[in-house]
Image: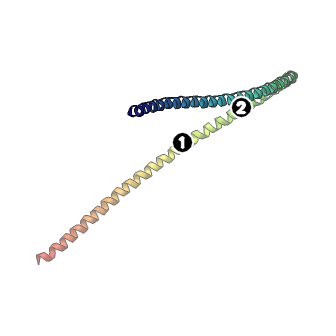
Amino acid sequence: MIALALGLCVLIWFQWLREGRSQAAVQGLTDERQNLKERLQGLEANLKTSQDEIIRIDKLKEGLQEQVKTNVAYAFTLMNTNDVLRREVDIRNKQVAAYKEAIEEANAAIKRQNEDVERQNKEMKRLSDERNEVAEKFNKAVTDFNELAEKWNKQNADLAAAAAAAATNAPARK
């Protein structure tokens, strides 16, 4: 009986190991199936996005083709406008020549005015120099006066100090 019980234990242990391996294999297959499902969903989403992008690009292409047609018509209009503008440029060039003459006359007048201003600037500089000389003389007189006032104040302070010293020494002599 013991041998039978031990045999059954070994059989159960062996069955248990085999069942564990089977469960691991099943779990691996389940994980792989789930990964494949997720990958398939990702690919389907990419396909949908790609299809939407293709539709968008087709619409954009159609719009650009219409724009090319419009641009060709606009180019013809521009060529016609170009001829009109060239004639206008000729007219404007003649006006520019007339304006140049007027500007030359105005420049001559400005030149004369600049000469007058330059002359006035020289006169102002001369007057400014004279004013600076007078100011320098005044500043020197003020400096001399301040020095004299300092000497006067110092002399008065010395005399007052001497008087005070004499007054404090006089009672001590009695």
Q: Which residue is mark 1?
A: 126
Q: Quadrant of the N terminus?
A: top left
Q: Is residue 137 left or right of residue 48?
A: left
Which residue is farthest bottom?
174
Q: Position of residue 154 (x, y in %)?
A: 28, 61
Which residue is farthest left?
174
- Helix, strand, or loop for circle 2? helix
141 lies above or below 74: below
Q: Is residue 12 visible?
A: yes
Q: How is the image coloured?
A: rainbow
**Labels in figure, total:** 2
Q: Residue at x 65, y 37 (%)?
A: 116
Q: Which residue is mark 2?
A: 107
Callout 1, which amino acid?
A: Arg
- Helix, strand, or loop for circle 1? helix
Q: Position of residue 100 (x, y in %)?
A: 76, 27
Q: Quadrant of the C terminus?
A: bottom left
From mark 1 to mark 2, how far is it between C-alphas? Answer: 28 Å
Circle 1 residues within 10 Å: few <14, some 14–19, many ≥20: few
Callout 2, which amino acid?
A: Asn
Task: Return the disc, 1 or 2, that comes first in the chain's sequence.
Answer: 2
Q: Is residue 119 left or right of residue 19?
A: right
Circle 2 residues within 10 Å: few <14, some 14–19, many ≥20: few
For discs 1 and 2, the disc positioned in front in the rendered view: 2
Q: Nearer the viewer, residue 92 or 142?
A: 92
Q: Is residue 100 visible?
A: no
